[in-house]
Amino acid sequence: MDASVSALLESRFLERLRRKDASLFGKTTQDEELARNCLGWVTAPAASAAGLGPLRSFAEEFKSEGWDAVAVLGMGGSILSCRVFRDCFPRNESFPRLEVLDSIHPDAVRHFEASLDLKKTFFIVSSKSGSTVESGCLMDYFFNRVDALFPGKAGRRFAAITDPGTSLEKKARRLTFRKIFTAPPDVGGRYSVWTAFGLVPAALSGVDVDAFLRDALEQEKRLWAPADDNPALRLGARLACGELTGRDKLVLELPPRLRSFGPWISQMTAEALGKGGRGLLPVPRESDGAPKAAAPDELAVPIATNAVAEFLTWEIAACAAAFLTEANPFGEPDVESAKVAARGILESAGRAGPKKPRGRGPKPDFYASGIPAFCDPELKKLVFPERPTGYSPLENALGAHLGRGRPGDYCAVLAYAAPQGKDAAALERFAALLREKTGLATVLDFGPAYLHSGGQFYKGGKNRGLFVEIIAPPAAPLPLPRRRYGLETVCRAQAEGDFAALLAADRRVLRLDLGAPGANHMAAIVNALDPRKLKKENRTSCRN
């Protein structure tokens, strides 16, 4: 690692990054142009601190209006910092609470809506590009709900955060949103904590953003100093050395108070480094502070310092690691592939409409204990080594899939389900059983949010993943206003699109479509890996 730190110092990496030198990441003209358009974060804390007056005034005005909650609707890097502000920073209790929604699963949306008093909730729609499908769907749904309560006046209860000139900005003006905040276009979503994407939700929920930015500027003195004990440089060198030596499972040891940092760091590292067949798998784990032995392929990093310092440290470290591994930290070449596939499915659904459904979808490769199953070609041959019958016990299908695991691999459960409630608990158990059964690092990610985070690494990083994609049906459909399909269709399109992208990337993947809500298939997939439950069910069946 010391050699990597020396390499960073000798190349004057920090000084060049501070000057926004795009040639650090410019193997090609296209790479350099991309980097040049994404380095605004380097000076964003100072720029935002100098222009904080209007936000400060609006926050004081807003505080006195009797709102109960500020609800942020969005996806990906532009909203991940909001949860960190909510959970990890002190706040003035005279401000409304901050809530964040980054799921379009109908059950999750209903759960979120039930937690709010819509008459006392101020909504913020957050999208850097302004065209994020999920953000647009959530905006349409909640705007329609609020408009039913305040006909013609719903716009006064909404704000938008986006880049200048986007379709979201234009729509927000048309719908007479109370506020439209624009952010610097040269600051990428995952670096946007220093811009309106992070500062507006924080300020409106009582976080002292003046103190936050002052602390950031103070931390910069240490973190931009080119010294061999610079914590950001040393972390970047550790990440690069881990990637290059096979310690590519990045275990984030998170104390309970900093748990919300896990998704933010995961996106930062997965998207910065997970491309070109390289990268690190982020594995967030809650830590009690006691040292734990790391597996041979694990790189354990404790997260236990000043929250502001963590933001800056990881931003610089991700760029340093990318420089050392010859990656462009700002490119997301494999995020778009799933989006393209999903858009095609939604266009088909839009043409068909509700009265002419898109059909039953693609034909399953086989049925696993009655559950429609889809898989890569190799797995189908393993499940049916002689003649395909179209039917297999679920435990056999899972066994064949997991049996392909090799040392250094990992398991990822990609769940299109509500990230709370019974399904979420069952999925947590399923992921734990996968870890026990395989001995491999295992993560549980909820879709479609992960498409804007770990999805880049899953398709662009090392081909070491065993993927189990699970589509859980909602309790009921959730229609969208002025669209010919509902949120359940959008969620399924994202799942099917990512499955197609994983297959195109030659990944080992098994997809289980759990069908009707009453089928109890979620319990079945857990039982298929849990021998204790299987034995209990068998005894019950015999008694019956």
Image (tube, grey):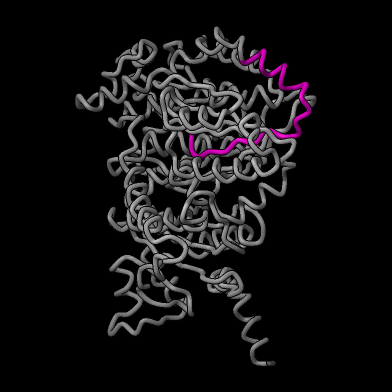
User: Is the residue 480 above or below the residue 24 in the image?
Assistant: below
Which residue is found at the position 74% from the left and 35% from the top?
A: 120
Which residue is found at the position 63% from the left and 75% from the top?
A: 533
The answer to which image quadrant residue 523 occupies is bottom right
What segment is highlighted magenta in the picture?
A: 55-78
Confirm whether residue 163 shows in the render.
Answer: yes
Which residue is found at the position 42% from the left and 65% from the top?
A: 511
Query: Which residue is most to the left?
Result: 28
Q: Is residue 492 magenta?
A: no
Query: Which residue is most to the front?
Result: 152
- Residue 541: x and y, percent? 64, 88
User: Is the residue 537 above or below the residue 241 in the image?
Assistant: below
Query: Looking at this view, is 464 or 341 the one in front?
Result: 341
Q: Relative to 249, is 534 on the left or the right?
A: right
Q: Relative to 455, is 460 on the left or the right?
A: left
In the picture, which quadrant includes the C terminus?
bottom right
- Residue 118: x and y, percent? 71, 41
- Residue 71: x and y, percent? 64, 36
Query: Looking at this view, is 178 or 151 the one in front?
Result: 151
Query: Which residue is most to the top?
Result: 50
User: Is the residue 165 above or below the residue 482 in the image?
Assistant: above
Number of marks = 0
Q: Relative to 388, is 53 on the left or the right?
A: right
In the picture, which quadrant includes the N terminus?
top left
Confirm whether residue 234 shows in the render.
Answer: no
Query: Looking at this view, is 57 or 318 the one in front?
Result: 57
- Residue 428: x and y, percent? 59, 57
The answer to which image quadrant residue 72 occupies is top right
Q: Is residue 62 magenta?
A: yes
Which residue is found at the position 62% from the left and 43% from the top?
A: 286
User: Is the residue 135 above or below the residue 511 in the image?
Assistant: above
Query: Looking at this view, is 265 or 473 the one in front?
Result: 473
